[in-house]
Image (cartoon, rainbow, N blue to C red):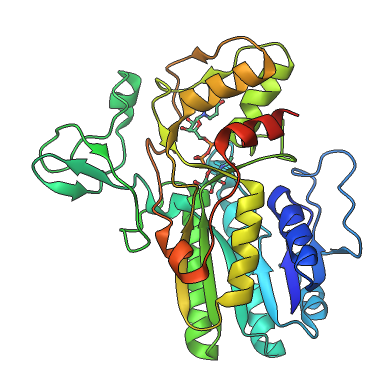
């Protein structure tokens, strides 16, 4: 297959590129090398077209002769503050719209979109009385008082963990999450009009070698590792009990390439997670042990845009595209540290 990979110089993009080449595909790579992501020397990606997905001319050129697009170019993370809103909307949604319009003109009708678990908001919890429920946004006064667990929206009681399936309610809670969901909606409307196919891969928390570090948009594993490298304790927000699913970047790359190879019809969302929820406190402890650094410090701080727990059920990806995660957490942490 001839694949256009946008965001090819990014943390995930580089691994997707390597995986595409390993599996014998021909690639065209596009990346704008944005300065807020690529501080210092950008990574070397052979044949990289330096261009922005918002630039219709650059995109049109990149699309020539392509069978499928893997669209990873995006502004990620929780952002700094509300002043980030226009950039999330512009980079992620306007960028996707320009790409889709160019795909329609160039008759490229298959898309793999890098979406995110954040589209589910607070996810799913199990109430002893009401069964599976979707908690609302956490109130700032509750967070400030150290009440981090979102209660059952119907009776206020505690919730047990539950895994989110693709058909769960969509409820983005911050600018990034909203922009990712808008990308999915734009892609669906494109597919309806053009007959194209879309695999929206809702990536869980990706970690692994090459993670962006020391930027406001870095993921928690990279932030913890940077602190440990400076000889400092990693700072764990809330009480450290927030659950995530940390999935290795090589498993994410394999899922992305399988979707490009196998998903040919219709619009389908797929969760991509390892299937083993862990707490942020567990991650900090594992990294501290692996680096021989100081034990984590639980600060009780919070970020208003954060969700408490979000863990995926990725069985659809396993059964429909025959994906399975291969990198175990302990090995993945070791890999990251090395
Ligand atoms: C992350 C990704 C997002 C992706 C999503 C998929 C980043 C920056 N964000 O969002 O792109 O779509 O996963 O699920 O890569 N925390 C600390 N200490 C810190 C920083 C964060 O304890 O110094 C905690 C946060 O409060 C949060 C958790 O770590 O509970 C994860 O935060 P973060 O890595 O920013 O990721 P998500 O918001 O889960």
Above or below, comparing residue 257 to residue 313 in the picture:
below
Residue 81: image quadrant is: top right
Residue drawn at x 73%, y 53% is 15
Residue drawn at x 31%, y 58% is 169
Residue drawn at x 16%, y 41% is 127
Give how far across and how far down residue 23 sits, in percent. Answer: 75, 68
Above or below, comparing residue 118 to residue 7 in the picture:
above
Residue 95: image quadrant is: bottom right
Q: Does residue 95 appear anywhere in the picture? A: no
Query: Is residue 269 found left or right of 91 in the rendered image?
Result: left
What is the quadrant of the C terminus in the image? top right
Residue drawn at x 82%, y 39% is 39
Query: Is residue 244 found left or right of 112 in the rendered image?
Result: left
Q: Nearer the viewer, residue 154 or 221?
A: 221
Query: Is residue 18 found left or right of 102 in the rendered image?
Result: right
Give how far across and how far down residue 181 sits, in percent. Answer: 47, 61
Give how far across and how far down residue 54 sits, in percent. Answer: 71, 67
What is the quadrant of the N terminus in the image? bottom right
């Amino acid at each position: 297959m001839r694949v256009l990979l946008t965001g090819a110089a990014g943390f995930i993009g580089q691994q997707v590129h390597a995986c595409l080449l390993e599996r014998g595909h021909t690639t065209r790579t596009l990346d704008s090398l944005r300065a807020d992501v690529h501080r210092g020397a950008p990574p070397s990606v052979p044949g990289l077209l330096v261009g922005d997905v918002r630039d219709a001319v650059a995109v049109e050129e990149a699309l020539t002769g392509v069978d499928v697009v893997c669209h990873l170019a995006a502004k990620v993370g929780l952002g700094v503050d509300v002043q980030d809103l226009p950039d999330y909307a512009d980079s992620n949604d306007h960028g996707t719209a320009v790409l889709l319009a160019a795909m329609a003109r160039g008759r490229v009708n298959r898309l793999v979109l890098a979406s995110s678990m954040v589209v589910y908001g607070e996810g799913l919890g199990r109430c002893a009385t009401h069964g599976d429920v979707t908690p609302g946004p956490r109130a700032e006064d509750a967070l400030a008082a150290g009440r981090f667990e979102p209660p059952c929206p119907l009776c206020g009681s505690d919730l047990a963990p539950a895994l989110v399936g693709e058909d769960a309610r969509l409820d983005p809670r911050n600018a990034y999450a909203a922009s990712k969901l808008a990308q999915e909606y734009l892609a669906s409307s494109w597919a309806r009009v053009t007959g194209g196919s879309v695999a929206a891969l809702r990536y869980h928390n990706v970690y692994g070698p090459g993670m962006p570090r020391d930027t406001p948009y870095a993921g928690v594993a990279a932030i913890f590792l940077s602190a440990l490298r400076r000889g400092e304790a990693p700072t764990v927000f809330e009480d450290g009990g927030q659950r995530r699913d940390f999935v290795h970047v090589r498993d994410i790359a394999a899922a992305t390439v399988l979707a490009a190879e196998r998903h040919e019809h219709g619009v389908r969302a797929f969760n991509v997670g390892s299937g083993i929820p862990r707490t942020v406190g567990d991650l900090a402890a594992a990294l501290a042990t692996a680096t021989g650094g100081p034990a984590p410090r639980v600060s009780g701080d919070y970020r208003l845009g954060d969700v408490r727990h979000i863990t995926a059920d990725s069985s659809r990806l396993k059964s429909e595209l025959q994906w399975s995660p291969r990198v175990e957490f302990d090995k993945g942490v070791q890999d990251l540290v090395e």
